[in-house]
Image (tube, rainbow, N blue to C red):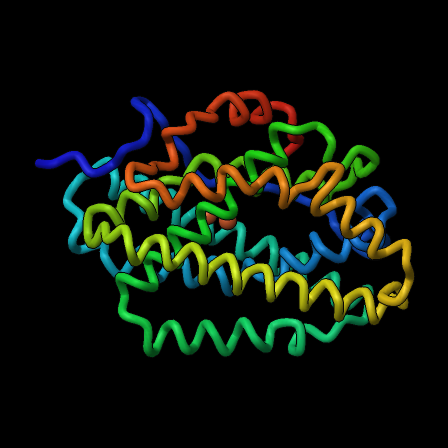
Amino acid sequence: MKKLSNSPEGHQFSPRKPNFSLQQALASDWYDGNAFRTAFENAFSMLFPLGERSFIESVKYFEKQINDPSLLNEMKQFYGQESVHRKEHQNYNELLCQLRGYNMESLLDAQKKRYDWAKNTLPPKRRLAGTVAAEHLTAILADDLLRNKDHFTNSGTHVAKLWYWHALEETEHKAVAFDVYAAVCGSLKIRRRALLFATHFIMRDVLRSTVLMLKKDGQLWKIRTWVDAVNFLFIKPGILRRAFIPWLQFLRKDFHPWKKDNRDVISEWENSIPIKN
Ligand SMILES: [Fe+2]
Ligand SMILES: [Fe+2]
């Protein structure tokens, strides 16, 4: 039987059962007291419940074509982890909208339409390629969050802990959708195009929600907000600037998520995030 999983030897993971108390922090600008950073990160959270549902569905569709027990086991752990992420972010988003008066329906409008379109019209292999690309984006941002100590410097809250936990599990399962895609399709052209589309739509959704949230908060037209935005995205820490080279690597013909073996961040964080098991 052909081995389809390309995870490092002995790499194992399974869903944790976290326990976060988000109520108090979500009511405030929990991300270092900074309105832009808080709205940007909250906008990201809005994408996960539906996004991760789509990830699970797109991978599960091909389950019958996979006969490598180790990849099948990784797929099972991937569904488990993404399901808990969905649940925690749903809770996060509901609380956030309640506490800050955001309209969840209008925040999710564009994403919901695209989800329905992808589910009903996109060929399953292209939908899976979209998941592979989106998982690459989350893996890049997760590595940056875990590796660099310049995030959440003044945010000792449960919200920050939730993001660390999510980043940890995204790192663990970063190659699952990729290995399934390699087994059932593998087209480089489709994978490259998927990265361009996924990047465009994810950034568009996040920026749109960020603007809607800042508008509701009365922060949209302040110069400070946009100076902070340029700083955060491009200068210090410059999360988009730092993501650019890893983003490009996905376009290489011989790319695989574990070519960058970053299990060091998993073991470093594993015991330092207070998550109840
Ligand atoms: Fe996730
Ligand atoms: Fe994921």
Q: Quadrant of residue 73?
A: top left
Q: Return the residue nearer the eye: 227 or 267.
A: 227
Q: Please report the residue visible at 63 percent of the width from the left and 36 percent of the height from the top.
A: 145
x and y percentages locating residue 141 in the rendered image = 57, 42
Q: Please report the residue visible at 67 percent of the width from the left and 60 percent of the height from the top.
A: 43
Q: Quadrant of residue 231?
A: top right
Q: Please report the residue visible at 8 percent of the width from the left and 36 percent of the height from the top.
A: 1
Would you place residue 219 above or below residue 264 in this image? Answer: below
x and y percentages locating residue 10 in the rendered image = 32, 22
Would you place residue 189 above or below residue 152 in this image? Answer: below
Q: Is residue 81 visible?
A: no
Q: Quadrant of the C terminus?
A: top right
Would you place residue 224 above or below residue 234 in this image? Answer: below
x and y percentages locating residue 221 in the rendered image = 88, 67
x and y percentages locating residue 113 in the rendered image = 50, 78
How many labels sit on residues?
0
User: Residue 177 vs residue 246: left or right?
Assistant: left
Q: Is residue 18 visible?
A: yes
Q: Return the residue nearer the eye: 117 or 161.
A: 117
Q: Please report the residue visible at 69 percent of the width from the left and 52 percent of the height from the top.
A: 41
User: Residue 145 vs residue 53: left or right?
Assistant: right
